[in-house]
Image: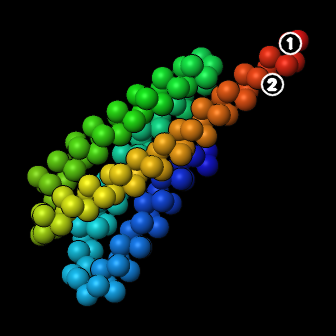
Amino acid sequence: MRNLLIIPLIVALFAAGMCGLFHVMGWPQHARELGTVAVVCALSGDLSLIPAIFAPRGGPIAVSQASLVGTVTHIFLTLVLAAVVWAAHPMIMERQAFIYLLLAFYWISLVGLVIALVRIVRKASSALQTAGAKVS
């Protein structure tokens, strides 16, 4: 369950860092775009964990394959959610800032997703090893 908190935590810390960077550099804050992109990337990252969370019954190989599906799902969900926000959200004033922030937040949320997926795969692998030790 802690794996679901990794991505929003990393995205929130990155958003706070970006706000601080914008303030220090004297750049416009782009708070709406920053918040919207953070929500899009955190949501797509958490939804991308679903295949790996429900795959442990198949062992570490199934979890590894589900993790790969999760990373592909992440890019498509980010793209689709960003397109929906782009088309339907009237609060996005600076479209260029939205795209640049989306690119940065996509990579940060991908790092969080990979961290969470590695933890899930390691847990499945260690569960298999302990089950094998009990049988022997």
Q: Quadrant of residue 15?
A: bottom left
Horizontally, is 36 left or right of 117 in the view? left
Q: Examine the rendered structure and indicate whether residue 21 appears above or below residue 101.
A: below
For the residue marked with disc 1, what is the amino acid? Val
Identified at 60% across, 32% down, the residue is 121
Horizontally, is 119 left or right of 130 in the view? left
Q: Residues within 10 Å of mark 2 (few under 14, many from 20)?
A: few
Say whether residue 42 is visible.
Answer: no
Q: Residues within 10 Å of mark 1 (few under 14, many from 20)?
A: few
Q: Examine the rendered structure and indicate whether residue 8 appears above or below residue 13.
A: above
On residue 123, the disc is none
Viewer-closest of 90 and 41:
41
- Residue 70 is situated, as x and y percent measured from the top left of the image, at 42, 33
Say whether residue 35 is visible.
Answer: yes
- Residue 67 is situated, as x and y percent measured from the top left of the image, at 48, 31
Identified at 42% across, 73% down, the residue is 16
CA distance separating discs 1 and 2: 9 Å
On residue 130, the disc is 2
Q: Which comes sooner in the sequence, label 1 or label 2?
A: 2
Q: Examine the rendered structure and indicate whether residue 134 appears above or below residue 102.
A: above
For the residue marked with disc 2, what is the amino acid? Thr
Residue of label 1: 135
Viewer-closest of 47 and 122:
122
Identified at 60% across, 36% down, the residue is 120
Secondary structure type for disc 2: helix
